[in-house]
Image (cartoon, rainbow, N blue to C red):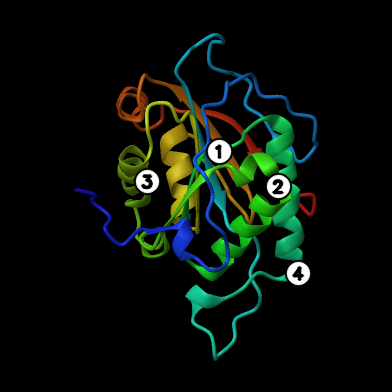
């Protein structure tokens, strides 16, 4: 039985049409050519058949709050829409293409994802699930990293090598810092690129633990 029975699949969302499951893609080295991407000096050994990549993406900038809207329902600003497109293109250029996307169901996160899917055929092939739990968990100190681990292990498969989780601060910043053992700042539409090795996602999280994931870079939009 699934632990998160409140998950909505992509077919249930009016913003994004149904996406077919992606086939396994080979994982290569990270190529960085943009000045707005920060890359770690040390990388995992090449040639591993079980390299696991995790993208932790904070949603793009949202519009100013309105009294008539709940925080959960705030849409993206015009700048946020441009940033979502910018980061999508950078991830595609670097070869960090998710096969599985787990996203908060907040409006600004859905809209960020919609732009990314529409901008890239490769992104559009990802399997997508919306997780209502991602919105509240991000506001709970010290809980996001453990929650992300449980959800990824539940919804992923051994042949899925790249997963993207989309959500909110402060939880996403905290989770990226805990996984990598580094102090990470994630402004809106920043993506932390994390990597480790494991025959399964369970093994990857168990062997890396907290602080054992390699931080391969922080992808930022052109505006920052």
Relative image position of residue 126 (x, y in whole percent): 54, 43
Cα distance in 3D space between marks 2 and 1: 13 Å
| Residue occupying the point 70% across, 63% down | 80
As helix, strand or loop, the secondary structure at mark 1 comes to: loop
What residue is disc 3 on? 148
Which label was assigned to residue 87? 2
Residue 104 appears in view: no
Say which label, 4 or 2, has the lower sequence index: 4
What residue is disc 4 on? 78
Cα distance in 3D space between marks 4 and 1: 25 Å
Labels 4 & 1 near each other (Cβ < 8 A) = no
**Could you classify mark 1 by the number of other residues whose Cα lies within 10 Å: few (under 14), some (14-19), or many (20 or more)?**
many
In the depicted structure, whether residue 12 falls above or below residue 127: below
Relative image position of residue 79 (x, y in whole percent): 76, 65
**Could you classify mark 4 by the number of other residues whose Cα lies within 10 Å: few (under 14), some (14-19), or many (20 or more)?**
few
| Residue occupying the point 41% across, 39% down | 178
| Residue occupying the point 60% across, 56% down | 113
Give whichever of 21, 37 is nearer the camera: 21
What residue is disc 1 on? 98
As helix, strand or loop, the secondary structure at mark 4 comes to: helix
Which label was assigned to residue 14? none
Say which label, 4 or 3, has the lower sequence index: 4
Say which label, 4 or 1, has the lower sequence index: 4
Cα distance in 3D space between marks 4 and 3: 29 Å
For this view, does 85 lie left or right of residue 161? right
């Amino acid at each position: 039985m699934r632990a998160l029975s409140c998950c909505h699949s992509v077919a249930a969302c009016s913003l994004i049409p149904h996406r077919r499951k992606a086939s396994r893609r080979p994982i290569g080295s990270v190529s960085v050519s943009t000045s707005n991407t920060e890359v770690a000096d040390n990388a995992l050994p090449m040639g591993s058949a079980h390299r696991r990549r995790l993208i932790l993406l904070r949603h793009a900038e949202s519009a100013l709050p309105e009294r008539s809207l709940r925080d959960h329902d705030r849409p993206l600003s015009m700048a946020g829409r441009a940033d979502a497109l910018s980061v999508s293109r950078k991830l595609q250029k670097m070869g960090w293409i998710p096969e599985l996307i787990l996203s908060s169901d907040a409006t600004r996160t859905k809209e960020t994802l919609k732009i990314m899917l529409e901008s890239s055929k490769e992104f559009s092939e990802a399997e997508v699930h919306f997780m209502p739990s991602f919105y509240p968990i991000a506001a709970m100190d010290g809980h996001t990293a453990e929650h992300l681990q449980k959800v990824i292990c539940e919804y992923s498969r051994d042949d899925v090598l790249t997963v993207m989780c989309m959500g909110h601060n402060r939880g996403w910043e905290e989770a990226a810092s805990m996984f990598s053992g580094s102090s990470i700042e994630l402004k809106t539409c920043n993506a932390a690129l994390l990597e480790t090795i494991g025959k399964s996602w369970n093994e990857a999280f168990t062997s890396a633990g907290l602080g054992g994931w390699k931080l391969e870079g922080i992808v930022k939009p052109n505006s920052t």
